Image (cartoon, rainbow, N blue to C red):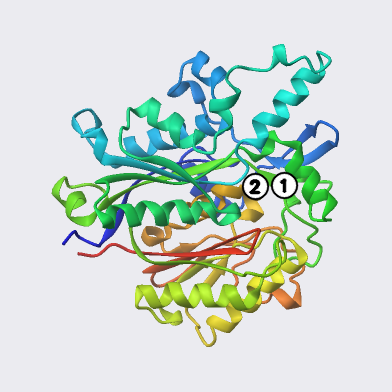
Amino acid sequence: MLDSRIVITGLGLTAPNGNSLSEFRQNLLAGVAKIEVLDMRYMGPVPAGVCHFEAKKYQKRKEIRNGTRAGSIGIYCSREALQNCGLDWESFDKSRAGIYFGITEHGNVETENEVFNISKYDYDTRFWSHHHNPRTVANNPAGEVSINLGVTGPHYTIGAACAAGNAGIIQGCQMLRLGEVDFAFAGGISESIQTFGIFAGFKSQGALATHEDPNKASRPFDVGRNGIVVSEGGAVYTLERLVDALARNAPILGEIAGYRINSDAGDAVLPDAVRQTECVRAALSKAGLQPGEIDIVNTHATATPQGDIQECRALREVFTDCPNTYFNNTKSYIGHAMGAAGALELAGNIPAFEDLTVHPTINVDELDEECKLPNLVVGDPVKIEKVDYILNNSFGMLGINSCLIIKRFTD
């Protein structure tokens, strides 16, 4: 029987406030948000999270031009994770590697851009790019990574709205346990700021954040919160079976302890605290844990009025009388990176296994009474006695919920 213990051996990321785990973590502990103002066509100025990674580090200019922003993010993160994990990639059997990325908006970005381009030529389709089809297929980001790295094992994406980052990691874990691959690139990718449709959609719902200071626009739990800051980003993990990681003396950042994905089966947009509660409890059960054994909970909270309240209701229901469980939020720094959100937010907390520090939630000037949580870390980092388990919530439209639990690795 294959070893069912799956560990994280590498991690590559790009976020609006960091292009490596160390830079990202340093800014989270220092309370540094980096949100910009974009001049979005048809809409004007909007706050957005923009990544500033060096795509040409791993791609030629022509590859960047012919591919997609999501593909470039995936390649950068995957290459960084691979370098981080120390695997001898040249001699590795690439048919035994797989790529599993969670995504949200991919495809409509490129279609919007092409329609806009041909509008300048009286909608003459002779000016439509012949790169359109490979750019817009849903497997594109994973496919671009497959070509760049020479991976001949499976590659595909998981469409799970804003729960997709967690879903990508869960899928990679499951494929390793099934013996389909021996090495997995897993996580979440988002190019969402390239599309006006997402901004316009949230604005039409009254859910697009506004603030005179873009770095204060994302305000989860604050009484003055007024919506989502749309961001791009990515986080890719290299996952391996424990026996394989130990055999090559790989660095181990953490171990997959438990997970759960479920559905509200209700409203397309409004979250359901009951189903979120069930999701968290099922993940705890799979991990064989009691709520009080969780040290850090990274909340999904997007800074929408009802979304934050419903999640806090679910968390208060699960974590009753858990004096050593702490709660934080990462979107307050980077906005909502959609398909990458869960994977990026988990990454921001993983270093707590070593430094025993809970990064704070920022931009909470006045805490909403309905968003009160015990040990909600606001403003300044908090040092705690131990960090053995981190729980990461990530929820999405159409009522998809995901919960992922990572544990400190011990022999």
Taking 392 as reference, is 276 left or right?
A: right
Tag of residue 165? none
Q: Residue at x 65, y 40 (%)?
A: 192
Callout 2 amino acid: Ala
Q: Residue at x 45, y 51 (%)?
A: 168
Alpha-carbon distance for marks 1 and 2? Answer: 6 Å
Tag of residue 33? 2
Callout 1 amino acid: Asn
Q: Point out residue 39 in the picture as x, y percentages from the top left corner.
A: 80, 32
Q: Are marks 1 and 2 in contact (CB under 8 Å)?
A: yes
Mark 1: secondary structure: helix
Taking 290 as reference, is 381 left or right?
A: right
Q: Quadrant of the N terminus?
A: bottom left
Q: Nearer the viewer, residue 74 or 121?
A: 121
- Residue 294 seen in the current view: no
Taking 271 as reference, is 326 left or right?
A: left
Mark 1 lies on residue: 215
Q: Nearer the viewer, residue 296 or 150?
A: 150
Q: Residue at x 75, y 25 (%)?
A: 115
Q: Residue at x 55, y 34 (%)?
A: 137
Q: Point out residue 312 in the picture as x, y percentages from the top left corner.
A: 64, 74
- Mark 1 residue crowding within 10 angstroms, few (<14) / some (14–19) / many (20+): many
Q: Is residue 90 above or below residue 274?
A: above
- Mark 2 residue crowding within 10 angstroms, few (<14) / some (14–19) / many (20+): many
Q: Nearer the viewer, residue 139 or 58?
A: 139
Taking 168 as reference, is 132 left or right?
A: right
Q: Quadrant of the C terminus?
A: bottom left
Mark 2: secondary structure: loop
